Every structure is written in structure tokens, then in C-alpha cells.
Amino acid sequence: MRGFLIIGNEAFTEPFNLSDLPGAGRIDVLCRCISQALFLSHSIRKGVEVYLLLLGEPDPPKVMRIKSDELRRMSPDERNVAGHIRKAVGFKISKDWVETNSGIFVARKNLNELLIELSKNYEIYYMREDGKDIRDVVTTMKNPLFILGDHLGVKKREEDLILGFIKSTISVSKFSLMAEQCIAIANYELDRAEIF
Amino acid sequence: MRGFLIIGNEAFTEPFNLSDLPGAGRIDVLCRCISQALFLSHSIRKGVEVYLLLLGEPDPPKVMRIKSDELRRMSPDERNVAGHIRKAVGFKISKDWVETNSGIFVARKNLNELLIELSKNYEIYYMREDGKDIRDVVTTMKNPLFILGDHLGVKKREEDLILGFIKSTISVSKFSLMAEQCIAIANYELDRAEIF
């Protein structure tokens, strides 16, 4: 198992215009993160979960969960992925997960509630530029889940909470990369180390 | 300097519908390749060139060149990148590069003509799953340019031509990754090895 949690600081929590994903609180960033986390060429990875914490207006917080092993009818282009997010944020939700498509779920959870749930199944790592070099520690990982911010990073309030749940901070590059690039690289390093 | 050439086997060579990039000969794949090659978080890499060989109907072949150092007004979402491709394929073209936007050029060249031009400035590597492990050879690279196929790979006719120009074949993973993931990983390995 491996997982990714991406924090969408301004990601819309109601249905949005599929022709303006950046204008929907940078839903485009989240789409690319999902795509890079889940897809191989012409197939979907096994045993990967992606979580999105949607914190934008008008109805935050909402959490989406995508389980690669159950996912159907998603393709890696932004518009297709966004259609799934759009459908999920239109659902009536509660604290419990509700399935909006095969392998896609949505619930009302705040970050603390989500981290409590995730820490039952995952070792949690927080991706930050000053973290430990992933290459030095990847071989020690077991069921890792990586937390990343979107284009706005992670705000101090959320970061303080995250730091209470993590095994360590992790860095993949001395450059400041886009979130989806960090995800592609984490998958790559885990594949090389045969951590599945 | 580093470069990427992506072969768009069916990529439309006339303006297309921005709301159906997969239906335009998988222009979405090319958009993600451009985005992953050029962008860092909130900035654009220095010294990167991306070439697209567009082989789809109705007017192939066309080649696009994007020079990161001169690029303006592009953002990393697929629709924005696609808008630049759409504009370029609408230009009247000739054998010589014509600039369609700051840092974006288009010309009529076939693969052989393009490879002759690229081999003047670059060491050319061909990404193929049975290639040499990039991690074993990255430190020896100097001004590398990587050739990748889109979702259809590289057809035999093009591959036979490419093999005459390359320094070696290169592989990044034992999994069959999407082209944009190979690009993100190549950038990552080059960054680590400080090959700029």
C-alpha cells in the first residue's frame, strides 16, 4: 500500500466549470496529482490511495478518497479526472464515506479526523523542501502515505497538526517542484526500492 | 541544456477543440509532457527545450519547439498548454522556424530533418523500456535530449531512424510509465547529478 494526501487550500467544494479548472481553486493541480499517482501507461497502479482535502468555498472541508484497485472509467487527462471531482463535490455528504463512482468516495472530515483515520493504516510522511532526502530513507518505508500541499503549500495551522502525526519530513529535490512531480518521483523511488 | 522530443503519432495538425484534447489525437499527453518538462513550482526551468513531432491528420508533419528561457504566458494546466499548441498548428508554416508566441516556434520538418538539427546541439537518448538504467549513466550525460513516444510509443519506421542518431537507449523504470512521468524522472535524475 502507498498513499498520497494533497491539500487543496482553495479547491472548490461545489461543482465547477470543467473549462476553467485553475479558476476553481486550482483543481487542475489536484487532477494532475491524481493522474500521476495512479496511472501507468495504459494501466492503473495496484494498491494506491489518493486523498484530497478540499478547503475552498463554499462548503469545506470535504475529503475525497480514490482507491486504485476499485477505480473504473477514469483516464489521465485533467478534464476527465476533474469530472470525477466535480461529481463527488456535488454529493450530499456525511462523516462516513459515500461512494460516488467505482473506487471514488467522499466524506465530511477535517484534517485531524482524516489523519487519525490514515494513521491506522499508513506511516505518514510530510513532503517539505527541508525534509530528509527520500533516497536515504526509502528502503525503510512500509505502507507510506505522503502529504503534500498544492500550489499554495501547507498553511501553518495545518502543518502544526500534520507534524503531530508523521514519521518524518521528506524531500525529493533541492528545487521547489510541483506537487504532481513530487508524487511521480515518490512512486519512482518506491518502485526502485520495491516498496509496494 | 537539456531537451525532450515527444512523438505525437496521431496529434492533430490543425486547430482542435480545447474541451476534447484526448479526441484531438491525444494532445493531452503532449500537454502533460510540456508541463512536466518545463515547470517548477511557480517558475520555469532554465535551459530546457521541448520538441513535439506532430504526425496526425490533416497536415503532417509539423514540429513545435518550446524554449523555456524565452517562454511567456504559459501555465501548467493542460488547457492552457493546449491553447498554445492549437495556435501553433494554425500558423502558415515553412521549413524555417516561425515564432507563434514568445518562446514557441513551429516548422515543417520530418523526423530525419529534425534529428539532423538536434544532433548539432544535443547528445540524443532514446527512452525505451529495455534501455540502460538512467541512474547508471546520468553522470556521463552532457546536453542530453530524450526522445519519447506518446501513448502509442514509437512506430518501427521512426524507431529505425532514431537508432541512427542516438548515443544510447535509456530506461527509467521496469514499469511502463506514461511519457510525462519519464520526463519528470529524467529531470529529477539530471538535477541530482547536477547536469544542466
Image (cartoon, coloured by chain):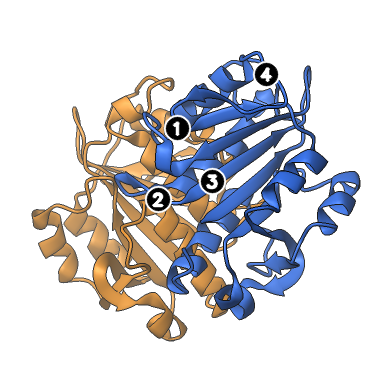
Chain colours: A orange, B blue
How far apart are the two marked residues, 3 and 1, measured between alpha carbons? 29 Å
Q: Which residue is mark 3?
A: B49
How far apart are the two marked residues, 1 and 2, measured between alpha carbons? 27 Å
Q: Position of residue A142 (x, y in %)?
A: 43, 79
Chain at numbered mark 4 = B
Mark 4 element type = loop
Vertical comparison of A50 with A89: above or below: below
Q: Which residue is mark 4?
A: B93
Among the 4 quarters of the image, the one containing residue A147 = bottom left
Q: Which residue is mark 1?
A: A82
Q: Mark 2 Cα within 10 Å, few/some/many (few <14, many 20+)? A: some
Taking the spot 57% from the left edge, 47% from the top edge, the residue there is A71
Among the 4 quarters of the image, the one containing residue B64 = top right
Do callouts 4 and 2 point to residues on the same chain? yes
How far apart are the two marked residues, 4 and 1, measured between alpha carbons? 35 Å
Mark 3 element type = strand
Say if mark 3 contacts mark 4, CB within 8 Å: no
Do callouts 3 and 2 point to residues on the same chain? yes
The mark that comes first in sequence, 4 or 2, is 2
Kind of residue at badge 4: Ile
Chain at numbered mark 1 = A
Kind of residue at badge 3: Glu
The mark that comes first in sequence, 3 or 4, is 3
Taking the spot 78% from the left edge, 39% from the top edge, the residue there is B113
Identify which residue, A92 or A178, lies in the foreground. Answer: A178
